[in-house]
Amino acid sequence: MKILIIGGGNMGMTYAQSFLRSHIAEKENMMILEKSPEKADELSKKDIGAVYGKPEDCVPTADLIILAVKPQDSAALFGVIRHLVHPQQVFLSIMAGVKMESIAKGLGVEKVIRAMPNLPAQIGMGMTAFSSSDEVTRIELVTVQNLLNTTGKTLYVANESLIDAATAISGSGPAYVWFFMRSLMEAAREMGFSMSEAELLVGQTFLGATELYNATNVSCDTWIERVCSRGGTTEAALNTYLNNAVRADIIEGAMAALNRAEELGRN
C-alpha cells in the first residue's frame, strides 16, 4: 500500500516515522507532499520516503492519503488535488473540525476517515479517536487503525460528532495536564524547592499516578479515598479545590473546547 502524507508538519512527520519504525510500512511506499521548498528539502534529508513538491507527481498513485494540513487550508487543498484523486483511494484526515461530509464534497470522493490524535503520539503514547464514512470497507478501516495504533491507543466512534468531543478531551487534554503540572511546580517553588527539584517531584508524581491507574481497575474516586485520610494533608488540598469549584471549572473548560471544535466545523 502506497501512503501519501500531505503536510510535513509535526503530526505528518510523527505518522511517517511511526509507520516506518513499527515496520507496518516500508520507506519505498511512503510519500510526503510539502508545498514549501525549504521544508521539502529539510524533509528529504530525513530518509522517511520520497518527498514531493507537486501534487500531480504523487496524489494519483497513492492508496491512502493522509490530510495533515491546517483546517483553514483545507478548501485550498481540495481545489488543488480534486482533479487528481480517484474513488478507490482512502482519505484519512486529522484536520480539526473539518467534517467528513466537507472532505467528501470538497474532493468528490466517498472513502473518508476522520481522526483526532494528540501530541503524545510523538512518543508512541498518543490517544486517537476516529470515525469513518459508510463507504470505507472493513479491511480498509482495520488497516488504517493498525497504522494509527503505531502512535498509541485508538478508539473508534460510530457517531462523528464524538470526534469533536474527543478533540476537547484527549486532543486538547495534554495541555490541561501540563497546566496543572505547571501550577504544582509553581507551588513547589514557593515552598522552597529548586526548579529541577520541582520538575522531578511533579513529573514523577503524574507519571506514577497515571501508570498506577492504568495498571488496575480501580476508579479515580477509590484512589482518592486511599490517599486521602480524614483531617490529613490531601483532604486539606481537595477541600480547597472543592470550595473554589475547581472541578466545575475543569468541566466548563472542556465544554468550551467542545463548543470551539463544533464552531470550527461549522465555519
Image (cartoon, rainbow, N blue to C red):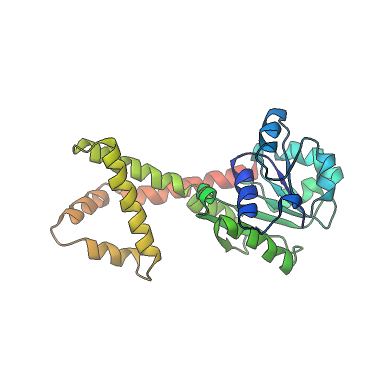
Direction from residue 261 to residue 227 in the image, left or right: left
Q: Position of residue 240 (x, y in %)?
A: 22, 49
Direction from residue 160 to residue 105 in the image, left or right: right
Task: State which quadrant residue 264 falls in.
Answer: top right
Q: Position of residue 51 (x, y in %)?
A: 74, 40
Q: Residue at x 29, y 67 (%)?
A: 222
* Quarter placement of the C terminus: top right
Q: Position of residue 71 (x, y in %)?
A: 65, 40
Q: Is residue 155 above or below residue 258?
A: below
Say whether residue 85 is visible: no
Q: Residue at x 19, y 39 (%)?
A: 191
Q: Residue at x 80, y 53 (%)?
A: 109
Query: In this view, which residue lies farthest toward the bottom?
Result: 217
Q: Is residue 208 above or below residue 256?
A: below
Task: State which quadrant residue 76 falls in.
Answer: top right
Direction from residue 254 to residue 181 in the image, left or right: left
* Quarter placement of the N terminus: bottom right
Direction from residue 134 to residue 131 in the image, left or right: left
In the foreground, 193 or 238: 193
Say whether residue 52 is visible: yes
Query: In this view, which residue lies farthest toward the top?
Result: 38
The tally of labels here is 0
Task: State which quadrant residue 153 falls in.
Answer: bottom right
Q: Position of residue 227 (x, y in %)?
A: 23, 61
